[in-house]
Amino acid sequence: MGDLATVTRLLTSSGNRFVDMNCRDDTGATALSRAARMGRTEVVRYLLSCPDVYVNCADHFGWTPLSWSARYGDHDVVQLLLAYLDIAADRADENGMTPLMLHHGKDMLRLLYGLRTAVTFVLGRGKGSSGSRGLVTQQ
């Protein structure tokens, strides 16, 4: 995943007017997933501004851009993704892990839990949109 100038040029050049923002590579990752995983904050910001971007697109492992950025501890990218209205912040991967479970360190846990209280990263009672219960095993 290149720098912002390269990504912008590739997506806006006249020959690429019909670029699929959600095109996947051989692992199922999109440009947004790759940028989030690599901590490319400005590229993530740009891609989130594109009207057709699918922010919750999971790769073959079930990891979303938020999963990748939470796992690798990129606070700025996590903040950008959590601010996105349609983010499924509690979506579990193929192993049942949510971004909250994949967090990297106490600061990331605080960020994931604190910034998105409206999306219930539940630690016991309610459920989020995917039905996961954050860190607590359902009984």
Image (cartoon, rainbow, N blue to C red):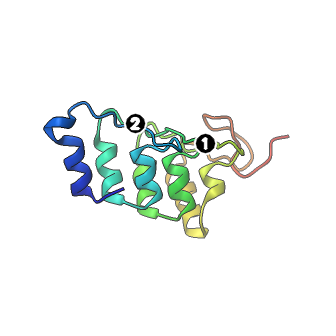
Q: Which residue is mark 2?
A: 22
In x, y percent, where is residue 25?
46, 43
Between residues 127 and 61, which one lies in front from this camera angle?
A: 61
Cα separation, mark 1 vs mark 2, equals 15 Å
In x, y percent, where is residue 134?
68, 48
Q: Amino acid at mark 2?
A: Asn
The residue sitting at 59% across, 51% down in the picture is: 99
Q: How many marks?
A: 2
Residue 126 lies in what quarter of the image?
Answer: top right
Relative height, residue 21 to residue 137 (above, below) = above
Q: Are marks 1 and 2 in contact (CB under 8 Å)?
A: no
Between residues 40 and 116, which one lies in front from this camera angle?
A: 40
Q: Amino acid at mark 1?
A: Gly
Would you say residue 114 is visible in this rendering?
no
Would you say residue 115 is visible in this rendering?
yes
5 displayed left or right of 28: left
The residue sitting at 60% across, 41% down in the picture is: 91
80 displayed left or right of 9: right
Q: Which residue is mark 1?
A: 62
**Secondary element type, mark 2:** loop
**Secondary element type, mark 1:** loop
Mark 2 is surrounded, within 10 Å at the Cα level, by few (under 14), some (14 to 19) or many (20 or more) other residues, namely: some
Residue 30 lies in what quarter of the image?
Answer: top left
Between residues 10 and 101, which one lies in front from this camera angle?
A: 10
In x, y percent, where is residue 17?
20, 33
The residue sitting at 69% across, 40% down in the picture is: 132
In x, y percent, where is residue 1?
36, 56
The quadrant in which the C terminus is found is top right
107 displayed left or right of 20: right
